[in-house]
Image (cartoon, rainbow, N blue to C red):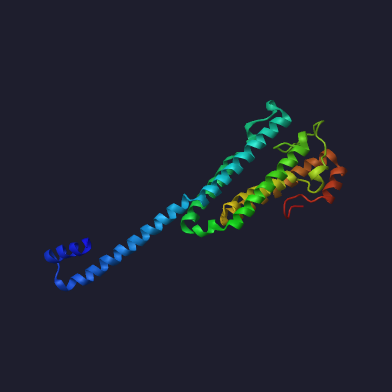
């Protein structure tokens, strides 16, 4: 009704009668497209703040908080507060950038491809792997006790013994194995395809460089004993001997 009245005013003041139907058709088409775009935008914004988004991001936040805080608390419990720094939180500039990128990807994709985030079987697999990775790492730290540190030891200390029991019977570096699984699983949980691939590659490359460096010193500390252990036991990180 308002649209018709508006066209009548324009018709009387500015338009030739033959132009009115065409103009009316153009304006109606414009209003239809604008309405559809607005509806799509509102739908996507609703999706962003839906239960899906809240659940996945809250799981991610809790996973990160628990992982980093427990790393610090375990280090304090094992080595004593005076021997532990905030570096044991394992929060670095690169770590924060990676997490920020993953959250950015999540929001971009939930706006452009909201259906991706509704693949609950993938998200739930990621959640299960987060728990598995976290458990493997924490069991490794507790089993190693004082032999575990967040930095590579380059000097042999009296209390530093070669740990080959418990979870270390199955893999040489279970803490690295657990962290690798955990980091990639956080992105599977968010249904982030780009970050899943990126986290897997970056984490793998990091451990592929760190493990040979660490084992150089372990060979110096324990000699043939470690050599025999390494020969019989996998590293725990895919494609890293």
Looking at this view, is 149 or 20 the one in front? 20
Task: Please state if 19 lies on the left or on the right of 147 as rendered.
Answer: left
Is 37 located above or below residue 64 in the figure?
Answer: below
Q: Is residue 208 above or below residue 222?
A: below
Residue at 66% x, 34% y is 72
Quadrant location, the N terminus: bottom left
Q: How many marks?
A: 0
Q: Residue 68 location in percent, x, y?
A: 63, 38
Decide if residue 220 is in sight here. Answer: yes
Of residues 55 and 196, the one drawn nearer to the viewer in this rendering: 55
User: Image height check: is 141 above or below 19?
Assistant: above
Q: Quadrant of residue 20?
A: bottom left
In the picture as drawn, the residue positioned furthest to the front comes out as: 1
Residue found at x 57% / y 52%? 190
- Image check: 218 left or right of 41? right
x then y, percent, for residue 211: 73, 46
Where 62 sits versus 46, above or below? Answer: above
Determine the residue located farthest toward the bottom in the rendered image: 18
Residue under the point 81% across and 31% down: 159
Residue lying at 40% horizontally and 55% vertically, measured from the top left: 42
Q: Quadrant of residue 25?
A: bottom left
Q: Position of residue 99 (x, y in %)?
A: 56, 46
Q: Quadrant of residue 151?
A: top right
137 or 216, which is in the foreground? 137
Residue 90 visible in the picture: no
Furthest toward the left, the residue is 13
In the rendering, at what x and y percent does residue 47 appear? Answer: 46, 53
């Amino acid at each position: 009704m308002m649209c018709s009245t508006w066209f009548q005013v324009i018709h009387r003041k500015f338009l030739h009668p033959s132009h009115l139907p065409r103009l009316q058709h153009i304006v109606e088409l414009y209003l239809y497209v604008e309405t559809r775009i607005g509806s799509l935008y509102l739908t996507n914004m609703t999706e962003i703040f839906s239960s899906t988004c809240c659940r996945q991001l809250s799981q991610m936040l809790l996973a990160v908080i628990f992982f980093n805080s427990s790393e610090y608390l375990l280090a304090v419990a094992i080595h004593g507060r005076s021997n532990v720094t905030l570096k044991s939180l394992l929060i670095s500039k690169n770590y924060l950038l990676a997490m920020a990128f993953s959250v950015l990807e999540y929001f971009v994709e939930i706006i452009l491809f909201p259906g991706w985030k509704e693949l609950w079987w993938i998200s739930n697999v990621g959640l299960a792997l987060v728990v598995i990775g976290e458990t493997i790492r924490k069991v490794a730290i507790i089993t190693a006790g004082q032999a575990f540190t967040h930095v590579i030891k380059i000097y042999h200390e009296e209390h530093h013994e070669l740990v080959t029991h418990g979870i270390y019977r199955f893999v040489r570096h279970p803490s690295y194995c657990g962290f690798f699984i955990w980091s990639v699983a956080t992105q599977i949980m968010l249904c982030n395809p780009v970050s899943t691939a990126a986290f897997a590659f970056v984490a793998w490359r990091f451990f592929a460089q760190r493990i040979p460096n660490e084992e150089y010193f372990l060979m110096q500390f324990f000699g043939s004993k470690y050599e025999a252990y390494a020969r019989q036991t996998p590293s725990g990180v895919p494609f890293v001997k």
